[in-house]
Amino acid sequence: MNFSSSVLESFSADLYLSTLAQVAHSDGLHPDEEAILREQAANFGLDILSLPDVPHNLAELPWTTRVLVYRDAFMLAHTDEKLSDEENSYLMELARRLDLPVMTVNEIKSWVSDYDALLSRLNQILSSNHANLSEGTGYKENLSSSNISHERDIGI
């Protein structure tokens, strides 16, 4: 699943990253936040030390940039696993400056929660692999001990 190029064609990586940096600095830069910002800058081929100022009228940014800025700002603010009062205030102001409808902001927050739950499930799956291997309960072993052959299941 990829974004279509038409959705991302007006995306502004430098303004996106500038806004995220401003969020990260709103309550003091946490080392994890700094690492994410540096990684994003490298991914976009940008110099983190020479980003443009964040314009006050963010509502003029393309819709996709506004939504992605808010989504990632919200995620970045949660990187240190707690949302400070300063970060919360900044995020509320950012949503206003981006001219995002309340419904969109709530959908983004819900998406982030869903995403966190999916990552947690993936971590459980990855962690359980070691337990299953030591118990000898792999997929191949389960197929060979089954009364129904796999070949019959797929019509061979």
Image: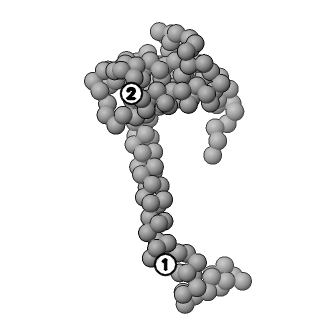
Which of 35 and 146 lies nearest the eye of the viewer? 35
Q: Position of residue 29 (x, y in %)?
A: 39, 23
Residue drawn at point x = 39 percent, y = 27 percent: 30
Residue drawn at point x = 58 percent, y = 85 percent: 144
Q: Is residue 63 visible?
A: no
Mark 2–mark 1 Cα distance, whole angstroms, equals 43 Å
Residue marked by disc 1: 136
Residue drawn at point x = 67 percent, y = 83 percent: 151
Left or right of 16 in this view: 151: right
Q: Residues within 10 Å of mark 1 (few under 14, many from 20)?
A: few
Q: Residue furthest left?
A: 85
Left or right of 140 in this view: 84: left
Q: Position of residue 122 (x, y in %)?
A: 47, 55
Residue drawn at point x = 51 percent, y = 27 percent: 37
Q: Secondary structure at mark 1?
A: loop
Q: Residues within 10 Å of mark 2 (few under 14, many from 20)?
A: few
Q: Secondary structure at mark 2?
A: loop
Q: Is residue 143 visible?
A: yes
Q: Which mark is residue 30?
A: 2
Left or right of 57 in this view: 92: left
As shown in the figure, which amino acid type bears the numbered disc 2?
Answer: His
Q: Position of residue 112 (x, y in %)?
A: 43, 39
Q: Residue furthest right?
A: 156
As shown in the figure, which amino acid type bears the numbered disc 1?
Answer: Gly
